[in-house]
Amino acid sequence: MEQNSLIPKQLITIGILGAIAVGLGALGAHALKNQLPRGLITVDQLNGFDTAVKYQMYHTLAMLLVVILKKSYTNKFLNTAYHLFFWGIILFSGSLYFLCTRNLIGMDGLKLLGPITPIGGLLFVAGWLSLSFSAFKKG
């Protein structure tokens, strides 16, 4: 498949991830924050949820940057960075969303997701390194 034919699909993915980040940010700032007095969420869990939202948005914007760079600079490391950022969002932010709301949704067993969060963080680091490597290799 030609590189430029992937870009619209990637932009759809980026748009959806950005919209989800905004929606979950609003949820955290309003609905979840209101659950603090009821004890259904702790301050640490609310902060963790906020971290997940921020990292999702940062890396959604990084994915957009990669797509923009690919318009003028084709490189396998850029493709790798895009995918690492995507899977980092899924594993890092996704696991944090569930970990931080497990009491609220009545699924304490979700604490088993804890080891997944750092794997997502490592994918973010690898994505940034891949983006860096793209400066040194063409093609």
Image: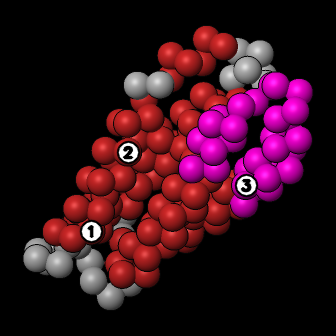
- Note whether 89 is above or below 11 in the view shown: above
Give the mark, 3 or 1, whose residue is nearer the N terminus: 3
From the top left corner, tell me how far across and down residue 114 is, in percent: 47, 25
Nearest the viewer among 91 and 80 is: 91
Kindly tell me whether residue 118 is visible in this rendering.
yes
Residue 29 shown left or right of residue 62 in the figure: right
Q: Which mark is residue 131?
A: 1
The quarter in which the C terminus is drawn is bottom left
In contact (CB < 8 Å): disc 2 and disc 3:
no
The quarter in which the N terminus is drawn is bottom left
From the top left corner, tell me how far across and down residue 78 is, in percent: 29, 68
Residue 122 magenta-highlighted: no
Rendered image quadrant of residue 116: top left
Q: Which residue is mark 2?
A: 121
The secondary structure type at the circle numbered 3 is: helix
Q: Amino acid at mark 3?
A: Gly
- What crowding class fits label 3: few (fewer than 14 Cα within 10 Å), some (14-19), or many (20 or more)? many
Residue 26 magenta-highlighted: yes
Report the span colored magenta: 22-51
User: Image point 27% across, 83% down: which residue?
Assistant: 73
Kindly tell me whether residue 5 is visible in this rendering.
no
Nearest the viewer among 70 and 2 is: 70
Q: Amino acid at mark 2?
A: Gly
